[in-house]
Amino acid sequence: MGLIHLPERLTDLLSELRHNKLEPKRLCLVQPKPGAPPHRVLVEAQKLARPGLKVLAPFSIQGADGNFTPEMVRVYQGKPLGAGEREGMGLM
């Protein structure tokens, strides 16, 4: 299961997931541009999975120049977010 939520509600989100037997497995903060505070959080959870959360590097939508980052361009092209550790994830 993949979720997009507000970072200020992350504690509530993780608590509710566990309460419903969904184990948070991967987490990625989304920031508008590098160095900006995150405005969204991506969380992937699995039903009845063992504990173990992997926190991924932050995802920036725009670069310092104001253009979309190469990763964001790939997302718009319908490709999975990132490479390697994020590939194969429903949301990320």
Image: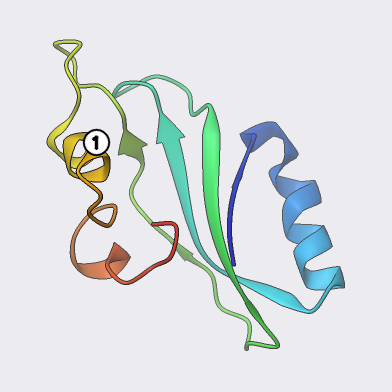
Residue at horizontal 62 percent and vertical 88 percent from the top: 50
Q: Is residue 58 left or right of residue 77?
A: right
| Foreground of the two, 64 or 87 | 87
Number of callouts: 1
Residue 50 in the figure: left or right of residue 15: left
Quarter holding the N terminus?
Answer: bottom right
Q: In this image, 62 relative to 43: left or right?
A: left
Q: Amino acid at mark 1?
A: Met
Say if 52 sits above or below 59 in the image.
Answer: below
Q: In the rendered image, which quarter contains the C terminus?
A: bottom left
Q: Residue furthest top?
A: 66
Residue 59, horizontal then vertical, whole percent:
33, 40
Q: Quadrant of residue 63?
A: top left
On the image, the x and y values in percent for residue 91 come to: 44, 57
Residue pictured at 13% horizontal, 36% vertical: 70
Q: Which residue is drawn at the image coordinates 20% and 24% (left, top)?
A: 68
> Is 18 placed above or below 65 here?
below
From the top left corner, tell me how far across and down residue 55 is, in percent.
45, 59
Q: Which residue is denoted by mark 1 in the rendering?
A: 72
